[in-house]
Amino acid sequence: MDNNTATTHASAGQEKLRIAVIIGSTREGRFGPTVGDWFVPLAEQHGDFHVDVIDLAGLDLPGIQPGWSTPPTPALSELSARVAAADGFVVVTPEYNHSYPGHLKVFIDLHRTEWKAKAVGFVSYGGVGGGLRAVEHLRQVFSEVHCAAIRDGVSFHSAWDHFGEGGRAHEAQGAAGAAKTMLDQLAWWSRTLREGRAARPYGA
């Protein structure tokens, strides 16, 4: 691995980081769970993280209300608590029409302070573009909610050709290496930002 790659692992007595892995696709026949099922064990085995999987397909997301005036439902309150508890995030996203899924945008917009001064990484998939155009748009969205996007990510171009029976990834070593690079960076940023939030409130 490149010596410039950020590396940090939870040592004895050091509290692990909580990351939420968000499965962003909700369409019937979606490929997101295959990619998510490949990625989540890598995150769990990394050594720095407790992983909470938030699958948007299993959620009844309300619409965005003007002025944020509508009281949250119990289900939304529980979801918001999970987002707030996370030290960082990984978004697993396809590319729809040159961008990201609408349900994912609704999910992001339903929360505000829960994202602030935390880090987010991306695992994308799609056709020739590998979902990278969705990621570039998401970087702008997360910047607006004060969430720091990790530079390196994982992308599967022509994603359906990269997975075989049982969801096993072809060329698994290369994909796992990309995931480790992203997770190393996510761990550094998430731990540093968690320590910063504990030392002084984020005021923006």
Image: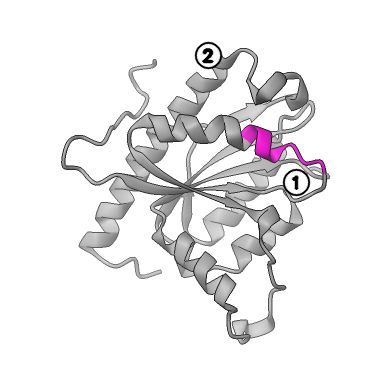
* Residue 177: percent from left, percent from top: 48, 19
Position of residue 98 relative to residue 115, above or below, is above
Quarter of the image that includes the C terminus: bottom left
Inspect the image, locate mark 1, and give the three-letter code of the amino acid beneath it: Ser
- As drawn, 201 above or below 163: below
Q: Circle 2 is placed at which residue position?
A: 173
Q: How many residues crowd mark 2 within 10 Å: few (<14), some (14–19), many (20+)?
A: few
Which amino acid is tagged 2?
Gln
Pick the front one: 106 or 35? 35
State the image coordinates of residue 5 (x, y, percent, origin top left): 37, 25
Which corner quadrant of the image does residue 107 belong to? bottom right
Q: Which mark is residue 19?
A: none
In this picture, residue 66 sits left or right of residue 203: right
* Residue 148 place in picture, x, y as percent: 46, 49
Q: Is residue 163 visible?
A: no
Query: What is the span of residues highlighted in magenta in the rendered image?
Result: 29-35
Q: Is residue 119 visible?
A: yes
Res 99 label: 1
Question: With respect to residue 202, does 42 lie above or below?
Answer: above
Numbered disc 2: secondary structure: helix
Residue 128, by quadrant, is top right
Q: Residue at x 41, y 39 (%)?
A: 186
Q: Please tell me which residue is depicted at 68% across the width and 80% down the height of the picture.
A: 65
Residue extending furthest left? Answer: 13
Verify CB contact (< 8 Å) between mark 1 and mark 2.
no
